[in-house]
Image: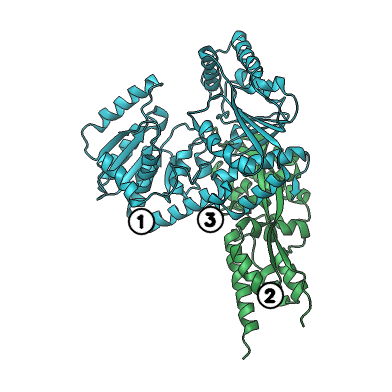
Amino acid sequence: MALNQYSGISPKGDLLLLQMLSAKLYNRSFLHINSTRAGGGVAEILQRMIPIIVELGINARWEVIEGDSRFFDITKKIHNALQGRLEKITDDMWQYHYEVNRRNVERLNLEADAVLIHDPQPAPLIEFRKDGRWIWRCHIDLSNPQQEVSDYLCRYGEKYDAAIFSVAKFARAMAIDEFIIPPSIDPISEKNRELTDEEINETLNKFQIPTDRPVILQVSRFDRFKDPIGVIKAYRMVKKYNDCILILAGSPATDDPEGEIVLNEVREDAANDPDIYILLLPPFSDRDINALQRIATVVLQKSLKEGFGLTVSEAMWKGKPVMGGAVGGIPLQIVHGVTGFLIHSVEGAAFRIRQFLNNPEMLKKMGEHAREYVRKNFLITRQIRDYLSVWYAIENKGKGILEL
Amino acid sequence: MGEIVEPFEFKQCISILKSTGKRAKKLRELRDVIATVSDECIFHHTCQYFLKGHILEYTSDFAHWAGESLEEKALAEQLSNIDPYDFKNIGDLRKELLGVIDDYLKRFPEPREAMPGDEFFFNETVTLIFPIGIRARNLAEFLTAIKYVDSGSIYYHFYEARIRLGGGIDDFSRWIEDAFDKKELAERIKAIDPFMHNTEGIREHVVEAIEEEVRKDMEVI
């Protein structure tokens, strides 16, 4: 059974509750719909999650809506507007958004006992519900949306039985139940599983990374919101006191013209410092990322704006305390002073790095706390547990306490 | 033959967070929402604080927010001093919270606002309670079990029980007293301050007390 792979890793209670809930929901159907089969965090988690739910005896299916470039241009704008960027979504655009969903209904089988619709792209499908419980799962940061756009979308949202957000501050005042379920990482995936020394050395050799000095690492896209220039500044401040190397690892952002500009800025700023490694990782570099996180002494996620920032949990799972910007979902993962440090400036980042490099005991202890915190809160089994709990709770509407 | 003892059945609870959609960016707003939100919401931000597994300087989400986001340290201390398990019902706890905030507002009428994004978000929970398939028939079995169970089980039997049973009683001490008539041991467990520990700390103290008792029972001379 798929769940067996998690025993000894995930909390016992989570696995037990998963079994109990799946016994209650045995043989019932659970449909997930999003807008892409590959790429992005939602597809990544669904790929791992659906087989586990099936193994639990629930008929889980995953469908993807299809759309043309006009549709995805519109949904990209909706996405940006929900994250606070100024975009104009005209009536025509909303109508096309609805129309593409209507066309998808002709080819999708929407019959299921529970339907989980991911993000705004397929949100209008609610208009075509047949039966079952319908839940809208919003992965986007809605804390500061363009009001008009979020209001329009909420008209669909309020027709669902419930909504799910990743962080409490993303939730809105709606007339339906709103659950808070953070995303998760899969501890047995290529990105997070234990690696052998040989596998780690392979990555070190590939990128010619020395191991004679402490390694500071940030894994992220080359994007201004991830503040790579700030990371280099912090590294330089640390370098005056502690010899160390810096690795900035990320995928080249081919679909983002600004990515190229930021990358060039980073390269220029790093100048010819031989101790700064800028690694452009192709897609599917999960094992290399895993290895880099494992060889790192300290990990940074110096974001200025962030969705959830699961790279934080990935590093924490490898026993590394993370210093992260206090934005998006990062404060949920970093308990300041316990599982890492929340930082608010370049100086703060530099100071915390020096603290870690000079206190190996503190580094080790916080790293242990970090791993344990992820084990309890951010593993995939917890997320599946929560999805099934929400489904079960909706079926027992009104009860705050449910005894199984 | 000894008497047949009612076994201790270990349970666990897991809570799924639910947003109320309400938020506060200043102390007056916090006060006004506390006055009207559901009992479940007050329960979550006070009693369930201990489910978090780590206790920092505070003992409730309200105190934490006052200290960290408003930087009103004195208010945070006063709110931290409210023991949510000391009240007969949530209504009384709510009154106490409001009393402390109102007093503070009289003395300091214009406390600062929280930074955007750092507002207080009011949540409640749906709690699922389930047996974890572990039963203890004597103290030795109990000792093995309590070292093994998840911290959610410790929370259920030590913290949540106080609300369920009232009067500051937890499931562990009640069972020990009812099943074995070990009043002293029961008192010792009852006396562990729920306020000063996280669930792991509670586990350590309970283990210590039971271990000592089991050792005492074993020693014949």
Task: Determine which quarter of the picture holds residue A254.
Answer: top left
Which secondary structure, mark 3?
A: loop
The answer to which image quadrant residue B8 occupies is: bottom right
For mark 3, what is the residue?
Answer: A8
- Residue A200 x %, y %: 33, 47
Instruction: Specify the amino acid type for callout 3.
Output: Gly
As drawn, the chain in cyan is: A
* x 31%, y 42%: residue: A203
**Count of numbered badges drawn on the protein:** 3
Q: Are marks 3 and 1 in contact (CB under 8 Å)?
A: no
Figure quadrant of residue A114: top right
Task: Determine the secondary structure under disc 1.
Answer: loop
Q: Position of residue B1 (x, y in %)?
A: 77, 83
**Which residue is drawn at the image coordinates 52% and 27% (left, top)?**
A37
| Image side of residue A396 versus residue A168, left or right | right
Labelled disc at residue B185: 2
Amino acid on which disc 1 is placed = Asn
Q: Is residue B125 above or below residue B201?
A: above
Front-lying residue, B98 or A388: A388
Q: Are marks 2 and 3 in contact (CB under 8 Å)?
A: no
**In the image, is A245 to the left or to the right of B192?**
left
Colour assignment, chain B = green
Q: Which residue is mark 1?
A: A359
Residue A77 in the image, given as x and y percentages of width and height: 53, 17
Q: Is residue A178 visible?
A: yes
Q: CA distance from mark 2 to mark 1?
A: 41 Å
Provide the chain ID for the residue under circle 2: B
Q: CA distance from mark 2 to mark 3?
A: 33 Å
Same chain letter for marks 2 and 1 = no
